[in-house]
Image (cartoon, grey):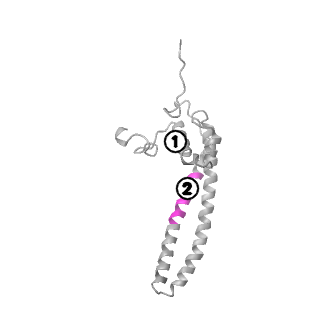
């Protein structure tokens, strides 16, 4: 009886260099767009923190008896609407591009992950499942392309320690 070699599982190992998928130019551009949008969302998060700090300062000044602070509060209201709209638009765009990227990435490494490309997308939208499946899906994608968890981290701290690597 002979045993045929089995392909490495997405959970226990990485594919050999011959099994690693070639990335198309369009896929790389999509990944770059996803990263750029994530950075933009981070910038809007910082802007929102600054805006809210300004709003708290304006309300505090008003409560301390400064009647001129009403103008600051009005400025805060107008600016916060603009920041909120831009932040929401960038977050929505990032979500759409992320889901498209994740679907295409899962499709390129089909068979090396625990779930189908459809589940890679759908897991973000199913209650309860969305608490854990997206993390597993991204971890599977990371391993399927032959990379290991980033140095100093082990899948979000779920197993092992930096001393054991």
- Of 40 and 57, which appears nearest the observer? 57
Q: Give the residue at the far front of this rendering.
A: 128
Residue range highlighted in magenta: 33-47
Which residue is label 1 attached to?
139
Where's residue 147, x and y in %?
49, 38
Using the image, tell me which numbered label, if any, was put on residue 26. Answer: none
Residue 77, horizontal then vertical, whole percent: 58, 76
> At x 54% / y 36%, what residue is drawn?
144
Q: Residue at left 53%, top 21%?
A: 5
Q: Nearer the viewer, residue 101 or 92?
A: 92
In screen coordinates, is 121 left or right of 159?
A: right
Residue assigned mark 2: 38
Residue 150 in the figure: left or right of residue 40: left
- 135 left or right of 108? left
Q: Secondary structure at mark 1?
A: helix
- Name the image quarter holding residue 94: bottom right
Q: Secondary structure at mark 2?
A: helix
Cα–Cα gap, marks 1 and 2: 18 Å
Place residue 73 in its image quadrant.
Answer: bottom right
Residue in the image at 57% along x and 33% along y: 112
Q: At x 51% / y 75%, what residue is drawn?
A: 55
- Nearest-to-viewer mark from 1 and 2: 1
| Rendered-image quadrant of the C terminus | top left
């Amino acid at each position: 009886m002979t045993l045929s070699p089995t392909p490495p599982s997405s959970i226990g190992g990485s594919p050999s260099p011959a099994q690693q998928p070639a990335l198309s130019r369009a896929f790389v551009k999509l990944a770059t767009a996803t990263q750029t949008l994530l950075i933009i969302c981070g910038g809007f998060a910082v802007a929102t923190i600054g805006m809210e700090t300004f709003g708290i300062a304006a309300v505090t000044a008003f409560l301390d008896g400064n009647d001129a602070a009403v103008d600051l509060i009005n400025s805060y209201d107008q600016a916060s609407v603009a920041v909120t709209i831009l932040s929401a638009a960038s977050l929505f765009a990032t979500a759409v591009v992320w889901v498209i990227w994740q679907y295409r990435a899962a499709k390129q490494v089909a068979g090396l992950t625990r779930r189908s490309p459809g589940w890679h997308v759908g897991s973000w939208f199913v209650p309860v499942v969305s608490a854990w499946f997206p993390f597993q899906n991204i971890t599977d994608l990371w391993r399927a392309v032959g990379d290991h968890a980033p140095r100093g981290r082990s899948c979000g701290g779920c197993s092992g320690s930096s001393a054991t690597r």
